[in-house]
Amino acid sequence: MKMLLASTVLAAGLLGLGGAASAAECGDVTIANMNWQSAEVAANIDKLILEAGYGCKAELVVGDTVPTLTSMAEKGQPDIAPEAWVSLQPEIVNRGLTDGKFIKAAKILSDGAIQGWWIPKYFADANPDIKTIPDLMKRPDLFPAPEDKSKGAVFNGPQGWGGTVVTAQLFKAYGGDKAGFTLVDTGSAAGLDGSIAKAYEAKQPWVGYYWAPTALLGKYEMVKLGYGAEYDAAEWKRCTSVADCADPKENAWPADNVETLVTKTFADRAGPDVVGYLNKRAWTNDTVNKLIAWMSDNQASGEEGAKYFLKNNEALWTTWVSPEVATKVKASL
């Protein structure tokens, strides 16, 4: 999912849903527990807050992007998808919204899911003139390739990833070959991660494809390069994302919208307090990166990650709920 690679808030209309409902009427609620870390910990945070703060009886159900969104659009279940990558399945999402099966709540990743070309922060600090891909193309000498030091290296993901296709197309669009660079196939997710870790530990230069939110970017601070171009949706569809397109143009990589979806039936039943929480609950990539890096380092489960977050980020999550709810959640930890 993460390699396939404007939120509509609920606002006043949603706050009016089920005005007579109370938190006590929340009842049973099913929450999609997606199979990647950021979504898993988000689901567990929702479970803890909804149970302790609002008296819900929450159940986590196994999910993934396509089956979960399809089930919500067709069957109205599960009740909540905390981290729905709506940009990846626009037809399913639009159908569910049009048919009244679900509604959008918070844009949980407030800055969107981010993909692109990154360099280590220590390298960016030492080379402030390299801020964009066009800047990069002027200095292949700073990024010697592992197999041919006379060329610069841009590290790519493994074959089969959407991000790998886009990186290869951008490499062509920006004239990587003519500029003296070579595109390095890292072969696997582990190979890509390993290339970053090796460079970072040795404080060596590195540039290549990666994405957020991820544990690795929580451990290794990286800076995303700009594109020197505005996002062109038509060009993206025509060529930037098409592997066999021969004439890609310079283009920017858009952030993916990652939002919370809530079934209409649950929103009506649970009332404005619960809906209000789901409409406020959001965080940045930087926050998520650091949290899932901690989870990875400590081999923590989604529940353990959620409790760690709630204990160590009160200044953030208490803005999502009332003081009364915050007190109940703190007492439950």
Image (cartoon, rainbow, N blue to C red):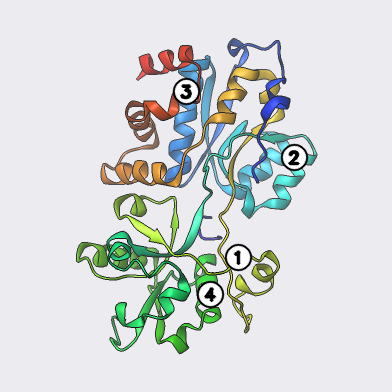
**Amino acid marked by disc 1:** Glu
Nearer mark to the viewer, of 3 and 1 = 1
Q: CA distance from mark 3 to mark 2?
A: 26 Å
- Inspect the image, locate mark 4, and give the three-letter code of the amino acid beneath it: Leu
In the image, 81: left or right of 207? right
- Give residue 193's position: percent from left, percent from top: 34, 62
Q: CA distance from mark 3 to mark 1?
A: 40 Å
Residue 4 vs 310, above or below: the answer is below
Residue at image point 67% right, 64% down: 233
Q: Who is closer to the viewer here, 70 or 111? A: 111
Is the residue 319 above or below the residue 199 in the image?
above
Please name the residue that numbered disc 4 is placed on.
Answer: 170
Identify which residue is drawn at 67% across, 24% down. 267
* Pointer 2 residue: 97
Which one is nearer the viewer's eye here, 256 or 186? 256
Q: Secondary structure at mark 4?
A: helix
Dot 3: few (<14), some (14–19), or many (≥20) neighbours within 10 Å? many
Instruction: Identify the residue under disc 1.
Output: 230
Crowd rating for badge 1 (residues with CA inside 10 Å; few <14, some 14–19, many 20+): few
- Residue 160 vs 70, above or below: the answer is below
User: Of 252 and 261, which appears nearest the observer?
Assistant: 252
Whether tag 4 and tag 1 are in contact, CB under 8 A, the answer is: no
Q: Sequence-wise, which precedes: disc 4 or disc 1? A: 4
Q: Which residue is mark 3?
A: 49
